[in-house]
């Protein structure tokens, strides 16, 4: 096992390909929806190359315009299942760098959240209700 899945983008890329074969731009779009922020091609395509080299995925061309479609191979599926069976820990590890804590209630914000500028500082909240409560108390 030479591939390290140390980011949420990589984790989701594999999961998305388990659903069905996808175009590169589909993967990008769905990643952005899932992760809630802009994804750059440099986060996705080099990883797809690696997956392809390991024969975890393969490339097919479809349609009149020879669009490239990525699909997962049986070997890739096995790899994905291994990841999923360990996904409790792994998922947490994968998302850890992106976990922030709500300034008001202290809950962990994994996706989305609500940011508010206060002077030069940007404060993170889980939602705008928390931000409002935070404002009401003394701040
Ligand atoms: Zn909160």
Image (cartoon, grey):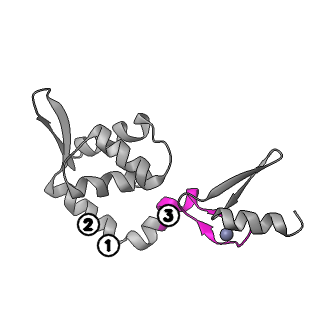
Q: Quadrant of the C terminus?
A: bottom right
Q: Position of residue 124 (x, y in %)?
A: 69, 58
Q: Is residue 104 magenta?
A: yes
Relative horizontal placement of residue 125, taking residue 49 as reference (left or right): right
Closer to the camera in the image, 23 or 129: 129
Instruction: Say if mark 2 contacts mark 3, CB within 8 Å.
Output: no
Residue for badge 1? 85
Q: Residue at x 38, y 56 (%)?
A: 11
Location of residue 120 with respect to 14 vertically, above or below: above
Q: Quadrant of residue 109?
A: bottom right
Relative horizontal placement of residue 55, taking residue 46 as reference (left or right): left
SS assignment at label 3: helix
Q: Quadrant of residue 46?
A: top left
Bin the neighbour count of mark 1 within 10 Å (Cα to Cα): few under 14, some 14-19, many 20 and up: few
Residue for badge 2? 81
Q: Is residue 3 visible?
A: no
Q: Position of residue 116 (x, y in %)?
A: 72, 53
**How far is mark 2 from mark 1, CA to CA?**
6 Å
Q: Quadrant of residue 68?
A: top left
Closer to the camera in the image, 79 or 130: 130
Asked if the beta carbon under badge 2 is closer than 8 A to the nearest atom of ligand 1, the reply is: no
The image quadrant in which ligand 1 is located: bottom right
SS assignment at label 2: helix
**How far is mark 2 from mark 3, CA to CA?**
17 Å
Q: Position of residue 108 (x, y in %)?
A: 61, 69
Instruction: Say if mark 3 contacts mark 1, CB within 8 Å.
Output: no
Q: Is residue 96 magenta?
A: yes
Q: Quadrant of the N terminus?
A: bottom left
SS assignment at label 1: helix
* Residue range corresponding to the magenta coloring: 92-110
What label sits on residue 93 in the rendered view?
3
Instruction: Say if mark 2 contacts mark 1, CB within 8 Å.
Output: yes
């Amino acid at each position: 096992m030479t591939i390290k899945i140390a980011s949420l983008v990589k984790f989701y890329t594999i999961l998305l390909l388990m659903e069905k074969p996808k175009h590169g731009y589909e993967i990008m779009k769905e990643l952005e929806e899932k992760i809630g922020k802009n994804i750059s091609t440099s986060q996705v395509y080099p990883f797809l190359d690696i997956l392809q080299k390991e024969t975890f995925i393969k490339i097919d061309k479809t349609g009149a315009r020879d669009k490239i479609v990525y699909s997962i191979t049986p070997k890739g599926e096995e790899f994905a299942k291994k990841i999923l069976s360990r996904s409790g820990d792994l998922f947490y590890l994968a998302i850890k760098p992106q976990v922030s804590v709500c300034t008001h209630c202290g809950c962990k914000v994994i996706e989305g959240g609500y940011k508010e500028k206060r002077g030069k500082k940007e404060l993170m909240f889980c939602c705008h209700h928390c931000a409002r409560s935070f404002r009401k108390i003394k701040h």
